[in-house]
């Protein structure tokens, strides 16, 4: 229905942003990755959009990059994956990391996303492995060192349980080198950064 909307970012909440265009405030659900690229007060910001009608309401999903909206639509083609789950995957993994995980048949990486178990990860790999656009993926990506499964999510949930929003926590975790660290170390370092921010 809408390919994109251009407007001003007037509000950023935990799961969505409000983009104002011609006196109308559009509630647009976004991934954490997209949210990290947005700030309240941004003018003439373009978001690629996907419009979905479900039994429980009408939803508009937005993305800063074409790569992200394309991956969102690819994930929706996988059986039993809906918009909410696709957005959760994109909130945890970048489109490039999802592509690399599919090409590597790396179920552990895909299972880092909330709502993605082993069977769903297997379906993602099986149904998308021949449809992945390998442009912009270099050889090093295929052999990249994988993070310990669920370490990121456990640290994310641990810090959120201390009262911080997903937006705040994710922003801090993305600035940290969490490779080779356990959950406790990540939470301790993250807490220090959040306290100083």
Image (cartoon, rainbow, N blue to C red):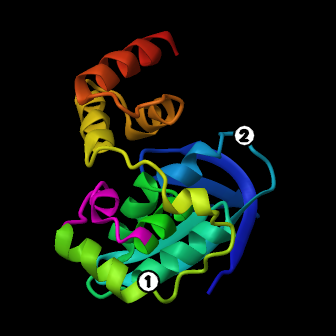
Q: Residue at x 73, y 52 (%)?
A: 8
Give left or right: position of 98 versus 3. left
User: Nearer the viewer's eye, disc 2 or disc 1?
Assistant: 1
Residue 95 or residue 161, whichever sits in front: 95
Side (left or right) of 124 relative to 73: left
Query: The residue tagged with tag 1: helix, strand or loop?
Result: loop
- Label of residue 41 in the image: 2
Of 48 and 2, which appears nearest the observer?
48
State the extent of the magenta-drawn residues as a range. Answer: 104-117
On the image, the x and y values in percent for residue 187 come to 30, 23
Camera-nearest residue between 143 and 3: 143
Question: Left or right of 38: which side holds 176?
Answer: left
Does residue 28 show up?
no
**Is residue 172 in view?**
yes
Residue 112 part of the magenta segment? yes
Quarter of the figure that contains the N terminus: bottom right
Q: On residue 129, which mark appears?
A: 1
Q: As rendered, which of 70 and 134 lies closer to the eye?
A: 134
Q: Check the image and report above or below for 102 versus 73.
A: above
**SS class, disc 2:** loop
Q: Position of residue 60 (x, y in %)?
A: 51, 71
Task: From this view, report whether residue 84 is shown above or below residue 188.
Answer: below
Chain-order first, disc 2 or disc 1: 2
Using the rendered view, name the quadrant where residue 24 is placed: bottom right
Tell me which secondary structure the magenta stretch mostly adopts. Answer: loop
Question: Is residue 46 positioned above or below 185 on the image?
Answer: below
Instruction: Answer few, some or many: residues within 10 Å of disc 1's Cα (few below 14, many 20 plus, some between 14 and 19).
Output: some
């Amino acid at each position: 229905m809408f390919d994109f909307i251009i407007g001003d970012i007037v509000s950023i909440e935990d799961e969505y942003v409000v983009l104002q265009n011609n006196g109308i405030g559009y509630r647009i659900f976004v991934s954490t990755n997209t949210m990290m690229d947005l700030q309240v007060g941004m003018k003439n910001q373009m978001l690629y959009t996907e419009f979905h009608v479900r039994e429980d309401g009408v939803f508009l999903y937005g993305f800063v990059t074409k790569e992200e909206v394309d991956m969102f639509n690819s994930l929706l083609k996988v059986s039993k994956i809906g918009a909410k789950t696709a957005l959760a995957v994109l909130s945890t993994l970048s489109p490039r990391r999802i592509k690399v995980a599919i090409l590597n048949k790396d179920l552990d990486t895909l299972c880092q996303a909330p709502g993605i178990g082993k069977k769903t990860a297997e379906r993602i790999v099986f149904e998308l492995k021949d449809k992945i656009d390998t442009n912009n993926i270099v050889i090093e990506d295929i052999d990249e060192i994988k993070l310990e499964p669920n370490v990121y999510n456990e640290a994310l949930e641990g810090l959120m349980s201390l009262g911080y929003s997903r937006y705040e926590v994710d922003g801090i975790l993305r600035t940290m080198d969490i490779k080779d660290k356990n959950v406790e170390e990540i939470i301790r370092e993250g807490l220090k950064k959040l306290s100083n921010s």
